[in-house]
Image (tube, grey):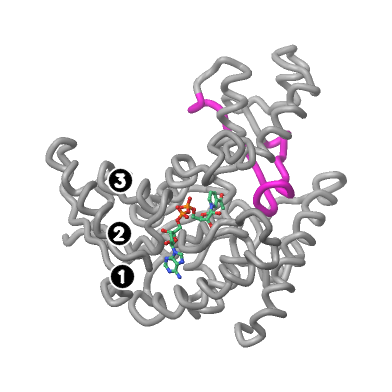
Amino acid sequence: MARDKIGLIGSGQIGGTLAHLIGLKELGDVVMFDIADGVPQGKSLDIAQSSPVEGFDARLAGTNSYEALEGAGVCIVTAGVPRKPGMSRDDLLGINLKVMEQVGAGIRKYAPDAFVICITNPLDAMVWALQKASGLPAKKVVGMAGVLDSSRFRYFLADEFNVSVEDVTAFVLGGHGDSMVPLVKYSTVAGIPLPDLVKMGWTSQARIDEIVDRTRNGGAEIVNLLKTGSAFYAPAASAIAMAESFLRDKKRVLPCAAYLNGEFGVYDMYVGVPVVIGAKGVERIVEIELAGRDREAFDRSVAAVQGLVDACKKIAPDLL
Ligand code: A3D
């Protein structure tokens, strides 16, 4: 069987890490695309030259032309510009929206059957715009945020309890970052929910609240440490987990920004919810009952995403 072809649209910090991981995991052949001349070519060659040492077989190529994405089964999108000092959220939205329009057109033309994972920020609005611009079925276009947010939460919890990260599960809903909604009662250590662990004296509610807060600000903590740029190892690993579930039809249950049209009472928006990812893309949306404070927090998160989507609609009415 021929290897899968994976297109990486954007070859910056995350794009390079994605290519390296795809090679190490032998997930397929890689085409790195970027508007910056030489960057995708240089990074793909560098990673290809590591393959004899690491012992993986994959073809890696770099390009500045969308044509090279022809036939890609998966496209992971990180193209865009980061927010710079003095730039408002709306300025960033406007610039990256234009990028999503270009990327969407390229995918529609050369990789219309691909499973598309968007990482570009502001995530929930950009994945919405990318789906509209590409015209691909909504179940084939998802956003990566929840896997990263829940991985950060799991890591902090494992550290708190001094147990393996493998035995910690975390459940998060809602938009990316500040408005993320961690569902503490569905987050567990070996199946034991966090509220029970508080009762068992493993930790206190105050510590859990601190960990939730640190998770919500997980991206900003790294930006402050790095001074330039944002996190890229964990975001890349998270997108790879989603791509792998699609390519290997694993049907993993992962929190992703998925298109909702009625589920959770949300219409025509991408919001972070648990989904099953298999060979058909988003095969199922796991619609849990939300009540009380969880519902309120989710609604607040949805309202924040709605604000961004409304801004997109104003800037680019043709997308609708
Ligand atoms: P960076 O290293 O700047 O890479 C972005 C790349 O996009 C650069 O190489 C640019 O040349 C390229 N680019 C710009 N415009 C275009 C275009 N029109 N077509 C093709 N390529 C283009 O950024 P990064 O890799 O660190 O991050 C990529 C994106 O992911 C950013 O928008 C980040 O904000 C976002 N991000 C999201 C998360 C989430 O959890 C959602 C986490 C971390 C980063």
Relative to the observer, which residue lies in front, 13 or 319? 13
Which residue is tagged 2?
40
Which amino acid type is shown beneath numbered disc 2?
Answer: Pro
Q: Residues within 10 Å of mark 3 (few under 14, many from 20)?
A: many
Image quarter hosting the C terminus? bottom right
- Which residue corresponds to mark 3? 20
Q: Amino acid at mark 1?
A: Asn
Q: Magenta segment range?
A: 165-186
Q: Position of residue 149 (x, y in %)?
A: 60, 42
Taking 10 as reference, is 209 above or below it?
A: above
Q: Residue at x 52, y 72 (%)?
A: 100
What residue appears at the point 68 percent right and 28 percent down from the top-left corner? Answer: 193
Mark sitting on residue 64:
1
> Contact (CB < 8 A) between labels 2 and 1?
yes
Say which element carries label 1. Answer: loop
For the N terminus, the image quarter is bottom left
CA gap, disc 3 to disc 2? 12 Å
Q: Tell me the residue at 50%/67% (across/down).
A: 141
Residue furthest to the bottom in view is: 318
User: Is disc 1 surrounded by few (<14), some (14 to 19) or many (20+) residues within 10 Å?
Assistant: some
